[in-house]
Amino acid sequence: MTRDIFKVAPFLDTGRPVNARDLCEHWRVKPTLGYPYAQNIKGLPKTLVVSVTRDPATPHEGGISLAKTLGASLLTVEGEQHGVALTAGNACINNIVADYLIGLKIPTDGARCVL
């Protein structure tokens, strides 16, 4: 995916190797989490994952996997952009995200919005 981005926007290419695992891997501080991340987290509150089906930066399959790993609720957004929570001007998305942020209200299984 990142290589595809560099093909259409070569000015974004830093020349460093592409590593889809974690953009923070080159941080100079030793990590405190092992890989894969976010497993067996005790006391994790109900969590909402918002994932866009054709997100150019974050594959939807990753959102599905994250929701499963966390035991979280997944809001699937049919669209083609990156970052839609409270930014897309979409009442369906915004209402679900606001309900979660304000009252930890989780949408029903299979919740979907369309951009």
Image (spheres, rainbow, N blue to C red):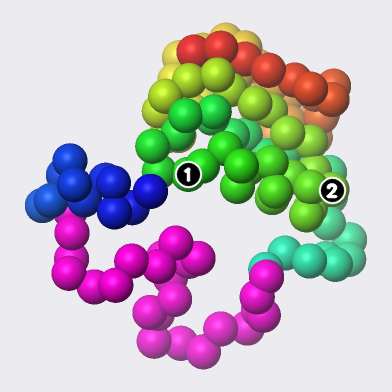
Residue 22 x, y percent position in the rendering: 48, 66
Q: Residue at x 72, y 64 (%)?
A: 38
Counting residues from the N terminus, which is met first, the one under dot 2 or under dot 1? 1
Q: On the image, which quarter does residue 16 sit in?
A: bottom left
Dominant secondary-structure state across the stretch colored magenta: loop
Residue 73 x, y percent position in the rendering: 79, 36
Pointer 2 residue: 71
Q: Foreground residue, 50 or 3?
A: 3
Q: Is residue 2 left or right of residue 10?
A: right
Q: On the image, which quarter does residue 46 sit in?
A: top right
Position of residue 4 relative to residue 91, above or below, is: below
Q: Is residue 85 visible?
A: no
Q: On the image, which quarter does residue 103 sit in?
A: top right
Query: Residue type at mark 2?
Result: Gly
Q: Is residue 43 left or right of residue 82?
A: right
Query: Residue type at mark 1?
Result: Thr
Pointer 1 residue: 58
Q: Residue at x 65, y 75 (%)?
A: 35
Q: Residue at x 51, y 42 (%)?
A: 59
| Outermost residue, right side | 43
Secondary structure under the numbered disc 1 in the rendered image: loop
Any magenta on residue 14? yes
Q: Which residues are magenta?
A: 12-36
Residue 55 x, y percent position in the rendering: 45, 34
Q: Is residue 36 left or right of residue 58?
A: right
Q: Between tags 2 and 1, which lies in front?
A: 1
Tell me, yes or no, whether the two marked residues, 2 and 1, touch with CB atoms within 8 Å: no
Q: Residue at x 68, y 17 (%)?
A: 112
Residue 26 x, y percent position in the rendering: 38, 79
